[in-house]
Image: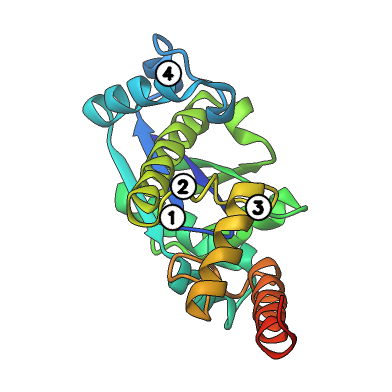
């Protein structure tokens, strides 16, 4: 058995990061599905393929929330965190070989890092843009992306529109700014170890204190 591994939203400032691994006997088992990089598919396409993948193939999903990411980042780099989560997802399936999307500028080094976290022998192939190179990693990418998208929709239900969760999204930044202004702290779904959140919190609180002191 082989498996592919990918993660969704490593760089987001809101919500969880999701790692997914999907296994099959050989990549040809996935040939009938229009699988490619999850970001190249429309949301409806991803959802439809996701349901088929969970129905027909062994899948493992590992999720780490914002607070968990902040805690881990106090002990290790984000790349090391992702490598451990990739390994955790692989260990749930225990394939003979695994293809992983490299989260390091040095793809081979990243592969060795993942292999070093495993508790069983597994041949690791680590490549940049592996979701576009290997159909099985593309399948894992779809599972991770849909799981993460559903988590963001749950945040919308709780907080109102939070945007995509990325620091480049004006809707996300406005949500964070408004929440900090109203509550004095970032929301629990925010990754506080991100500079975007820390800097925004400091500016928003300082602006609010200035308004109280000097008026609008």
Residue bearing mark 4? 45
Q: Is residue 131 above or below residue 42?
A: below
Tell me which numbered mark, 1 or 4, is placed earlier along the sequence. 4
Task: Name the residue beneath numbered marker 2.
Answer: 161
Task: Give coordinates of residue 127: x percent, y percent.
Answer: 67, 40
Q: CA distance from mark 4 to mark 3?
A: 26 Å
Determine the residue positioned at 53% across, 81% down: 184
Q: Residue at x 41, y 13 (%)?
A: 33
Q: Nearer the viewer, residue 124 or 132?
A: 132
Location of residue 199 (image quadrant):
bottom right
Q: Which residue position is annotated with label 1?
A: 121
Foreground label between 3 and 1: 3
Q: Residue at x 44, y 62 (%)?
A: 118
Q: Earlier in the sequence, mark 4 or mark 2?
A: 4
Name the image quarter holding residue 52: top left
Look at the image and tell me whether residue 12 can be seen: no
Where in the figure is residue 185, as x and y percent of width and height? 52, 79
Query: Whole-Å distance between the Cαs marked 3 and 2?
Result: 29 Å
Name the residue that disc number 3 marks: 103
């Amino acid at each position: 058995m082989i498996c592919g591994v990918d993660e969704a939203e490593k760089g987001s400032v809101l919500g969880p990061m999701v790692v997914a691994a999907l296994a099959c006997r050989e990549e040809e088992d996935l040939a009938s599905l229009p699988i490619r990089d999850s970001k190249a598919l429309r949301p409806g396409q991803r959802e439809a393929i996701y349901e088929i993948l969970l129905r027909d193939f062994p899948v493992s999903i590992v999720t780490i929330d914002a607070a968990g990411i902040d805690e881990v980042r106090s002990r290790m780099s984000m790349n090391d965190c992702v490598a451990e989560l990739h390994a955790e997802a692989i260990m749930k399936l225990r394939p003979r070989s695994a293809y992983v999307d490299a989260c390091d500028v040095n793809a081979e080094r990243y592969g060795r890092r993942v292999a070093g976290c495993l508790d069983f022998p597994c041949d690791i192939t680590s490549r940049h843009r592996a979701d576009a190179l290997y159909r099985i990693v593309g399948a894992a990418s779809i599972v991770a992306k849909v799981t993460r998208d559903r988590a963001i929709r749950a945040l919308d239900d709780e907080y109102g529109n939070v945007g995509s969760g990325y620091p480049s999204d004006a809707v996300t930044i406005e949500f964070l700014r408004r929440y900090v202004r109203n509550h004095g702290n970032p929301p629990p779904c925010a990754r506080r170890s991100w500079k975007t959140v820390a800097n925004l919190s400091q500016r928003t609180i300082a602006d609010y204190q200035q308004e109280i002191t000097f008026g609008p």
